[in-house]
Image (cartoon, rainbow, N blue to C red):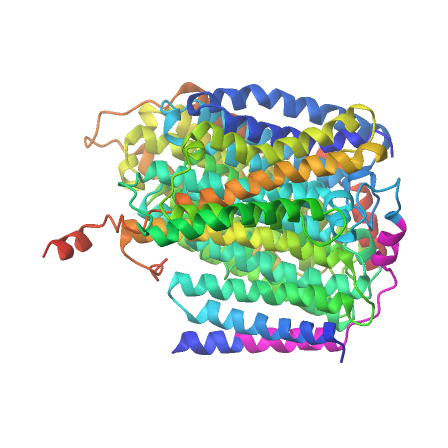
């Protein structure tokens, strides 16, 4: 009961405080959109879509660290699987209709992912969206019980997951050796380099999301605690 | 301004090391990481040299200057903290690599390197949203390190820590959203132009402060800390207590100084100081009541964090002298606690390994068999208690003078009482360790490198008290003059 | 009221709602969902408030994209820890005593 009261008070305070903040907000003197649109001129920035420019040019370090965050989640999932080995994996429905539909939809989904990646430089889209669609493909295949032999090799899988961050950091280093800032890619190469980074990121994001899905303990492998086992036997 | 490009290496080297350890097989990761440590120092040396030569360094990442881009800013405070991070991490890495069963926790290494990248990013970044990304990377890596053992206890501690970390960063993110709406910029330098008395800015700062206090485990928001820090591997506990909780504190400190023009700030600062006082007493009391050695050390962190938060009442609305003393005292306290606590956790890890039990009562006789580990624990204890000539003593002395200079004598009681309480729990450990009992005569030996790592950290916290002057002079300049402007 | 400001108000409501759920529930899955509701609220607030009366702003939109990836990673990590915790303890909430 007391928990409800605490929650209600906290929730009320935050709502009122935020409402006041929204009502009383001052008008800012700076305008980043104007700055951004001046900066996005051909020959200056590598991409023309403003959001992609913010993600991969102006604030590229945020995007770089965000991939690191995703990798951290995967490492933890891997470590926990090693600490708590899982039993046989029996995921996947043995349903011929599902198999057929997945096979039909798969090329289409790959096409959508490729389009989203390519579209990112001129209109909404980009690495995360494409990677999420690819990961969705992987999850569907997994649920349909189709095994992806390439993904069963831990070495390749790890390499693929790390590739995005590796490419991103590697592209950022040469400018530093030339006495410029980290990630300050030369203007004439920027477009191509950004596409390269985005392609690598797409692959890594897809593999990382898929791995996170696959590294959770399988549903069929129910709790390893003694009580439950006893109950099931009875 | 030139020479600032080298700052980026402080981010790039840990990220590359994280990638390398991810690709390397488990048994190479520990020694490979030790091999990468010199690179990190190699990246730091020219930066430090450039700073001593020309003052604050900056580099616009991607070649885009703020407010559109993000700059790394290497001021004295940031570089001092980078140096601390490198020092503590090097010794913790040595400790972890010396572990006889490195295969057991090969995943520690990539997580630790991501943690270092996040820390360096937080010390150097001058952009509030970039700090949010850094905080999340730091938090998730830290949670992962806590969960590493995979036992039920570790998972519960990790889960509790994760929930606190997520809620804390979300509160911070909402604050960022409000600040961006008010200032139209995310650069800390631009946010300093905001009117601190404005409602939106006040709400933003309040939300961010609460979120960051939750992440720093300030009493009464410390509930997640003891299990997380007390239950992890010793090297992990050392990193978490010495560095990770300090990251959110430093962000709060920087925000407070940037947005400090609010008449209400004095009241808020006093309230934060009271929480700090509560932390000192509650943490000390709970530390004394613990039966397990590492939990005692973890509660001691809860108590010591309290001293850091005395910064706010001592610097807000007080005179120039008090503010300068508070700044010096708080930073020295942060450094002294980082070194002493890391040394203490490593020493505690060695003692636990030696007796094969986590209980303080089982330490009987260990004083004769592992004198070096116990000595390290004791030396670290000297700094935690605040006895001369340790860093902890000098820091408390400065805070004490600041309290006197600003006429806020109640904080003296906190500083003195906290010292007495910490003496009680440190001596509780020593008393059990010196008991000569017939109960046990078999002890396992921790690796020599692990004992030396603990001793080095403990000794440096002791020496810090004498060598504080140079360090404080290095960290003082720019940031403080801005505060004094605000105060005057 | 502009559409953007409307989004900001929805964001405020979601933040309050999410916080309520986060505190009131014991079940970890529910707390995680509450966290995500609160996260969505903060994203709406970020974009809505910045764009109100000032037209489209790519910066907060990009920040939200970064924020979403981080929220996905955090949620996935939390789910992995949660499932492992359930597997060893049989509990779906945390023990109350600390």
Give the position of the N terminus of chain A as an image quadrant. Answer: bottom left
Measured along the vertical axis of the image, is residue B289 above or below residue B449? below
Using the image, determine if residue A176 lies above or below residue B186: above
Q: Looking at the picture, how far across and down is residue B94, in whole percent? A: 49, 24
Rendered location of residue A17, percent (x, y)? 65, 75
Q: Nearer the viewer, residue B256 or A206?
A: A206
Residue at x 57%, y 37% (from the top left corner): B114
Would residue A13 be counted in the magenta stretch? yes
x and y percentages locating residue A133 in the rendered image? 55, 50
Residue B327 painted magenta? no
- In this picture, which residue range is highlighted in magenta? A10-38
Q: Residue at x 89, y 39 (%)?
A: A43
Q: Position of residue B162 (x, y in %)?
A: 48, 53
Q: Is residue B15 left or right of residue B278?
A: right
Residue B404 visible to an observer of this rendering? no
Outermost residue on the left side: it is A234
**Considering depth in this image, is B355 or A144 the residue closer to the camera?**
A144
When asked about the image quadrant of residue B37, the answer is top right
Asked whether C2 or B80 is in front, the reply is C2
| Res B54 seen here | yes
Image quarter of residue A175: top right
Is residue C85 shown above or below A9? above
Q: Is residue B367 left or right of residue A164?
A: left
């Amino acid at each position: 009961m007391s928990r409800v009261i605490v929650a209600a008070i906290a929730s009320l305070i935050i709502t009122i405080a935020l409402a006041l903040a929204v009502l009383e907000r001052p008008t800012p003197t700076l305008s980043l959109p104007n700055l951004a649109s001046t900066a996005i001129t051909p020959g200056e920035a590598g991409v023309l879509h403003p959001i992609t420019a913010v993600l991969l040019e102006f604030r590229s370090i945020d995007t770089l660290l965000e991939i690191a965050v995703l990798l951290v989640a995967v490492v933890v999932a891997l470590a926990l699987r090693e600490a708590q080995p899982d039993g046989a994996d029996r995921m996947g429905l043995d349903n011929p209709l599902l198999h057929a539909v997945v096979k039909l939809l798969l090329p289409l989904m790959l096409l959508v992912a490729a389009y989203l990646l390519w579209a990112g430089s001129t209109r909404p889209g980009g690495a995360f969206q494409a990677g999420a669609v690819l990961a969705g493909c992987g999850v569907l295949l997994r649920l349909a019980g189709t095994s992806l032999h390439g993904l069963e090799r831990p070495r390749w899988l790890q390499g693929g997951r790390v590739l995005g961050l590796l490419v991103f950091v590697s592209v950022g280093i040469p400018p530093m050796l030339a006495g410029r800032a980290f990630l300050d890619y030369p203007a004439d190469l920027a477009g191509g380099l950004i596409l390269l980074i985005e392609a690598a990121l797409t692959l890594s994001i897809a593999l990382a999301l898929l791995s996170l899905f696959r590294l959770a303990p399988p549903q069929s492998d129910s709790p390893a605690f003694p009580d439950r086992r006893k109950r099931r036997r009875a | 301004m030139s020479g600032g490009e080298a700052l980026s290496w402080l981010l790039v080297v840990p990220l590359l090391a994280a990638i390398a350890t991810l690709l390397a097989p488990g048994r190479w990761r520990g020694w490979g990481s030790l091999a990468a440590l010199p690179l990190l120092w190699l990246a730091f040396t020219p930066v430090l040299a450039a700073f001593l030569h020309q003052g604050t360094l900056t580099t616009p990442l991607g070649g885009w200057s703020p407010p559109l881009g993000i700059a790394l800013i290497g001021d004295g405070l940031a570089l001092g903290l980078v140096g601390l991070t490198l020092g503590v991490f090097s010794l913790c890495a040595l400790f972890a690599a010396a572990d006889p069963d490195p295969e057991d926790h090969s995943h520690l290494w990539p997580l630790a390197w991501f943690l270092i990248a996040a820390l360096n990013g937080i010390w150097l970044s001058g952009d509030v949203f970039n700090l949010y990304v850094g905080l999340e990377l730091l938090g998730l890596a830290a949670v992962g390190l806590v969960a590493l053992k995979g036992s039920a206890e570790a998972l519960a501690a990790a889960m509790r820590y994760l929930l606190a970390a997520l809620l804390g960063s979300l509160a911070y993110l909402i604050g960022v959203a409000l600040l961006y709406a008010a200032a139209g910029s995310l650069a800390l330098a631009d946010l300093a132009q905001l009117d601190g008395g404005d409602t939106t800015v006040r709400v933003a700062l309040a939300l961010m402060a609460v979120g960051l206090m939750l992440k720093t485990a300030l009493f009464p928001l410390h509930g997640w800390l003891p299990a997380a820090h007390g239950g992890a591997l010793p090297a992990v506990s050392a990193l978490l207590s010495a560095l990770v909780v300090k990251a959110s504190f430093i962000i709060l400190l920087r925000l407070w100084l940037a947005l400090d023009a609010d008449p209400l700030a004095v009241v808020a600062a006093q309230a934060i100081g009271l929480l700090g006082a509560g932390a000192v007493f509650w943490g000390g009391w709970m530390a004394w009541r613990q039966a397990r050695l590492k939990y005692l050390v973890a509660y001691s962190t809860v108590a010591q964090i309290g001293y850091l938060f005395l910064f706010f009442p001592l610097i807000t609305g007080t005179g120039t002298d008090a503010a300068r003393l508070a700044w010096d005292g708080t930073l020295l306290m942060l450094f002294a606690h980082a070194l002493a606590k890391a040394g203490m956790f490593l020493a505690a890890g060695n003692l636990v390994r030696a007796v094969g039990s986590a209980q303080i009562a089982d330490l009987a006789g260990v004083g004769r068999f592992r004198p070096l580990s116990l000595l390290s624990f004791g030396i670290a204890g000297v700094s935690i208690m605040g006895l001369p000539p340790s860093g902890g003593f000098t820091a408390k002395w400065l805070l004490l003078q600041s309290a006197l200079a600003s006429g806020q004598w109640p904080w003296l009681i906190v500083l003195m009482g906290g010292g007495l309480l910490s003496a009680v729990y440190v001596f509780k450990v020593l008393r059990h360790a010196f008991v000569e009992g017939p109960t046990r005569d078999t002890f396992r030996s921790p690796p020599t490198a692990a004992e030396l790592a603990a001793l080095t950290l403990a000794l440096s916290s002791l020496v810090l008290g004498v060598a504080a002057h140079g360090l404080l002079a290095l960290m003082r300049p720019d940031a403080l003059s801005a505060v004094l402007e605000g105060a005057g | 009221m502009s559409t953007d400001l409307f989004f900001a108000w929805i964001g405020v409501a979601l933040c309050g709602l999410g916080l309520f759920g986060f505190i009131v529930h014991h079940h970890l899955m529910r707390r995680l969902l509450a966290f995500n509701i609160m996260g969505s609220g903060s994203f709406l607030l970020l974009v809505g408030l910045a764009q109100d009366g000032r037209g489209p702003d790519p910066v907060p939109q990009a920040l939200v994209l970064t924020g979403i990836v981080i929220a996905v990673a955090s949620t996935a990590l939390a789910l992995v820890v949660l499932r492992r915790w359930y597997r060893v303890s049989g509990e779906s909430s945390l023990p109350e005593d600390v």
